[in-house]
Image: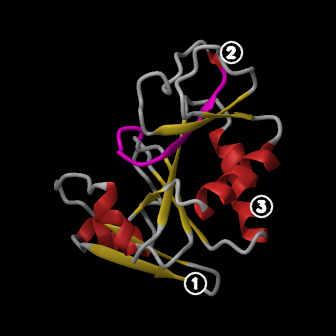
Amino acid sequence: MSVQLLGVVGWSGSGKTTLLEFLISELGKHGKKLNVIKHSHHDVILEPPHKDSARFRAAGAGEVMLVSPYRYAIVHELHHTPEPSLEDLLPRLAEADLVLVEGYKWAAITKLEVFRPDLGRDANFWDDKNIIAVASDIAAPSDLREGIVWLDLNTPRAIVDWIIAAMQNEKLSRF
């Protein structure tokens, strides 16, 4: 499988989820087949503990597939093994044109940072050489590192256009 990757990073409350929802919808309208990986630092509960699939996992099943007429989910229990890397997880996804990765700030993949200075947190683009674009609600700083594209967070269609161009020009990571 060869797929392009774009990480979307930023501090909590910066607007990553809202932007990702828009990007997924609009890129889909442009005929792009998308997958998303969302990293969470919290436990993920798909069904309450009293439901069958949770009981099967609690009994010791390594994986449980939950299937309905609308979707299916495979829950893989780690059983005290280390969290798998992004590279280990990518082959488990269906074929796509682009995988959007929310989180995984530490991953060595191309990234778009969503930056809102009003949150009072430092931007990541100063130190992370994998950040190739920033979507923000302020103007670009005068000392912006060469090669970073500055995008207006309040004009999300321009961000879609940038992603499409970056895909066409092979500017994104590939796995």
Q: Nearer the viewer, mark 1 or mark 2?
A: 2
Amino acid on which disc 3 is placed: Glu
* Residue at the (63%, 87%) spot, across then down: 69
- Residue 150 falls within the magenta-colored stretch: no
Q: In this rendering, would 125 be left or right of 62? A: right
- Residue 114 falls within the magenta-colored stretch: yes
Which residue is labeled 2 in the image?
118
In this picture, is 129 found above or below 68? above
Which residue is labeled 1 in the image?
68
- Secondary element under disc 2, as helix, strand or loop, is helix
* Residue at the (49%, 79%) spot, across then down: 95
Of labels 1 and 2, earlier in sequence is: 1
Total numbered circles:
3
Inter-mark Cα distance, 3 to 1 = 27 Å
Of labels 3 and 1, earlier in sequence is: 3
What segment is highlighted magenta in the picture? 105-116
Say if mark 2 contacts mark 3, CB within 8 Å: no
Badge 1: how crowded within 10 Å, few (<14), some, or many (20+)? few
Amino acid on which disc 1 is placed: Ser
Q: Looking at the picture, how far across and down is residue 24, in whole percent?
A: 69, 60
* Residue at the (53%, 60%) spot, across then down: 170
Which residue is labeled 3 in the image?
26
Question: In terms of depth relative to the viewer, which is nearer, 121 or 155?
Answer: 155
* Residue at the (19%, 52%) spot, across then down: 82
Inter-mark Cα distance, 1 to 2 = 43 Å
Which numbered circle lies on residue 79? none
